[in-house]
Image: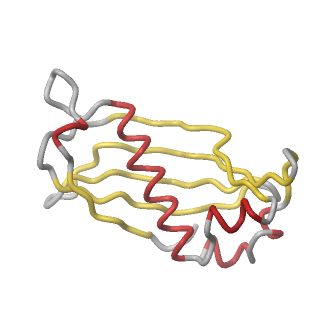
Amino acid sequence: MSATFELEMEVRDYELDFQGIVNNAVYLNYLEFTRHKYLDAKGLNFVDLHRNGIDLVVSRNEIDYKQSLRAGDRFIVTVNTEMVGHVRLVFHQQILRLPERTVCIKAKVTGVALRNGRPIPVTEISNHQNLTA
């Protein structure tokens, strides 16, 4: 598994539900945004890939909700990656409330690369060592 990539964020008031906690669907946005920043840091840009006929898509989300975030909470979203077979890249992610780094979310997100709607080996878009190191 790769070294951890981290991105710090803060809860915005419009992300809350009527209970005053972050809506469960918003966590998906936090996780996705961090994966995009991780891939950008690895030299992979979604727009450029799409222009070249390759789309990166999520095929599975598994999320364990441990604790809620509230307005103004600062948190870190982490990413570790793992190759599974030739076509799947698994993102192991956590959302940690600061400053204690309390685990709020644990997620396992499986992604695949598609060319013309068909899965392709991840090594075709980047040296897989680049994505998992």
**Residue 8, position as x, y percentages in the image:** 28, 64
Relative height, residue 54 to residue 105 (above, below):
below
In this image, 64 relative to 91: left or right?
Answer: left
Q: Which residue is painted at 13% across and 61% down in the image? A: 99
Q: Which residue is painted at 28% across and 43% down in the image? A: 104
**Residue 96, position as x, y percentages in the image:** 27, 53
Instruction: Look at the image and tell me in which quarter the C terminus lies.
Output: bottom right
Q: Quadrant of residue 101?
A: bottom left
Which of these two is toward me, 12 or 89? 12
Instruction: Look at the image and tell me in which quarter the N terminus lies.
Output: bottom right
**Residue 83, position as x, y percentages in the image:** 70, 61
In this image, 55 relative to 97: left or right?
Answer: right
Q: Which residue is painted at 18% across and 56% down in the image? A: 74
In this image, 101 relative to 6: left or right?
Answer: left
**Residue 30, position as x, y percentages in the image:** 38, 49
Q: Which residue is painted at 78% across and 59% down in the image? A: 54
Which of these two is toward me, 51 or 17? 51
Relative height, residue 60 to residue 40 (above, below):
above
Which of these two is toward me, 36 or 5? 36
